[in-house]
Image (cartoon, grey):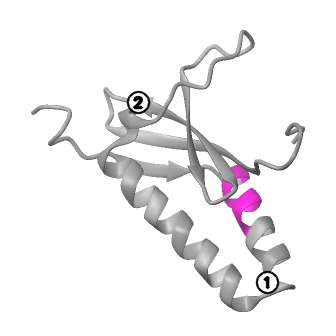
Amino acid sequence: MSEIEKTYDVDVNDSAKLMMLEHITFLSQVSITAAEKLYESFEKAFDSLSRFPHRCLVFETPYTVFEYRRLVVDRYVLLFIIDAKKNIVHVEYIWDSRQEDYNG
C-alpha cells in the first residue's frame, strides 16, 4: 500500500484534548458560534491527519527525540508524531500560535 492510500488512526492524547477544550471553552465565552467553528476545524484537522500526515512540516528543535510535525489550524498549532509501523498519528500538543512559547 502506498503512502497515498494509507490511512492512520488519530490518537489525541489527554493533555492535547485538555488544551483543545481550554481553547474552545475560552472562545465560547466570547462567541458560542466561533467556539463551535473551532471545534469543527479541529475535527477536520484530525480527519486530514488520518489521510495525509506526511504533508506537514517537521518541527525542528534540538531538544526532541521524536520527529514532531506541525499542522496549523486557524491560529492554533498541533504537534504530532507519526507511528508508521502502527499507522497511528499521535497528537501531543495544541496551543495558540500567538503565545510566545508553550510551557505546559
Q: Quadrant of residue 102?
A: top right
Residue, disc 1? 28
Instruction: Report the residue at 20% width, 33% height from top.
Output: 3
Q: Look at the picture and state if 51 lies above or below 3.
A: below
Q: Secondary structure at mark 2?
A: strand
Q: Nearer the viewer, residue 68 or 83?
A: 68
Instruction: Report the residue at 73% width, 50% height from top.
Output: 15
Which secondary structure is most common in the magenta stretch? helix
- Packing grade of label 1 (10 A; few <14, some 14-19, many >=20) is some
Residue, disc 2? 83
Instruction: Report the residue at 33% width, 28% height from top.
Output: 84
Q: Quadrant of residue 73?
A: bottom right
Tell me if 36 is positioned left or right of 86 in this view: right
Which segment is the magenta one?
15-21
Location of the C terminus by quadrant is top right
Q: Nearer the viewer, residue 5 or 30?
A: 30
Q: Secondary structure at mark 1?
A: helix
- Where residue 70 appears, as percent x and y from the top left, is 57, 37
Tell me if 51 is positioned left or right of 97 in this view: left
Q: Look at the picture and state if 100 lies above or below 40.
A: above
Tell me if 1 is positioned left or right of 67 in this view: left
Q: Is disc 2 in contact with disc 1, using a CB cutoff of under 8 Å?
A: no
Q: Amino acid at mark 1?
A: Ser
- Packing grade of label 2 (10 A; few <14, some 14-19, many >=20) is few
Location of the N terminus by quadrant is top left
Considering only order in the chain, which callout, 1 or 2, is on the residue closer to the N terminus?
A: 1
Tell me if 89 is positioned left or right of 75 in this view: left
